[in-house]
Image: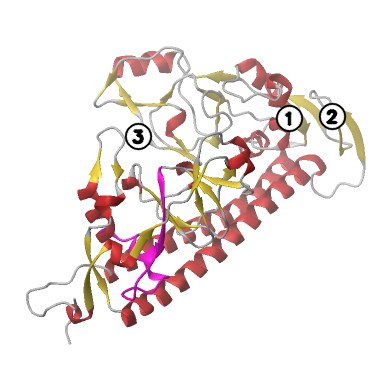
Amino acid sequence: MLKQDYWQKITFNEICKNVSTRVDDPKNSGYDKYVGLEHLDTLEPKITRFGSTQDIKSSMTLFKNEQILFGRRNWYLRRVATADFDGVCSADIYVLEPQGCKIVHEFLIIFMHSNQFFDETMKYSVGSMSTRVKWSNLSKAKFLIPSIPEQEKIINLISNIDGSITKTRQLLEKLKIYKNSKANELLTKGIGHTRFKKVRLIFGKYEEIPETWKLQKLGELTKVTDGSHYSPEKVSTGFPLATVENVKGDFIDIDSCYRISKEDYEQLVKDGDKPDIGDVLFTKDGTVGKTLVFNQKIDLVLLSSIAIIRRSEKLDSDYCNYLLQSKFMVKHLAKFFGGTAIKRIILKHLDLFEFPLPPIIEQQKIASVLSKIDEQIKYLEIHLSKLKTMRKTIINEKLTLPKLEEKPLVQ
């Protein structure tokens, strides 16, 4: 029997209904959780982030546990997910439920993650700057879906993958928590010490550190500079110029960098705006606090939003990188910015960054321990990414439209 014998031709409102219950006063509605478009992630089947209804002043839409939330504004971001809690959501989100006998209820969320669904949805979007989908149009959209037995097979297959994704994500979160705990322990207590002394840090807190360690400021150990304070002319080809947006995890995304001419590049290199292998980079403007050890063999210059902490014989680069991610840096910055949002820091604040400093050999040992944990985190992140790709691929393979010329569809 051919594949198309198992498929059904339906309109969307045969398998899905729009549930719209208005909540005029979210603060006093009895619901604590608020879900906006910003809490929905592309092709993530479950909602894991939310806000508070105490911050919401306008009317919202009620949703219940296991209902489907579909971001109708900028629908092409493919934000469709279910929640395992009750709450209220933005008016730019449709609250949907499966209905009818042509679909297994658990299959609807899977179907709405398919290319078939979004390719058809595109036909019903309106607007130019911020596209939206109207339910009156989407409800009449025509789709092809597998038979009930085939839906159940797909559900079981995707359910197994979702289970693996959940377990991997949970393990990843536990490992990140462990890393933070281990980093705090190693950066204050070191490895194998039995004698400690109490010191007062620049942000006012007392800390017990090994007796042989010293308190040091970053500017006493190495030179801290930043990139260019002017914007050279940008061209289509040439040398890469990096900004905060180009810092992706532990590397600079060269392909997304601006390009500048050879003349501008040579001038910026002369001014000292080029990072060298082993330098530590720290974003100090816009998104503050992203760090990495620069190890890319590329002719690259930086804008002033990125600070360069030069490689030093007194301070191991990997150890420095972990310090800049630690609670010491967080509390150090809090001294200068208080409780307000940090939007920009200056080089002086980095120069004054104070921390307990072990001998260089112990720095390297501590960095090695944390690096091994990072390797495990990276492995799990890659594994998680592969599982998500597998999920997406299988959904689209299973829901690829059949050829219709040989056999009729089930009506």
Q: Residues within 10 Å of mark 2 (few under 14, many from 20)?
A: few
Nearest the viewer among 220 and 251 is 251
Residue 13 vs residue 341, the one in the foreground: 13
Q: Quadrant of the N terminus?
A: bottom left
- 371 and 2: which is toward the camera: 2
The amino acid on which the numbered mark 3 sits, given as a three-letter code, is Ser
Judged by depth in the image, the label closer to the viewer, 3 or 1, is: 1
Q: Earlier in the sequence, mark 2 or mark 3?
A: 2
Residue matched to label 1: 331
Pointer 2 with pointer 1, Cβ within 8 A = yes
Q: Is residue 183 above or below residue 293?
A: below
Element under disc 3: helix
- Residue range highlighted in magenta: 92-115
Q: Amino acid at mark 2?
A: Lys
Residue picked out by circle 2: 205
How far apart marks 2 and 1 lie (CA) works out to 9 Å
Q: Horizontal and vertical percent for residue 102?
A: 31, 75
- Going by the numbered disc 1, the residue's amino acid type is Lys
Residue at disc 2, secondary structure: loop
Query: Quick check: 164 above or below 148?
Result: above
Marks 3/1: CA distance? 32 Å
Residue sitting at 28 percent across and 59 percent down?
117
Name the residue at the left extreme.
405
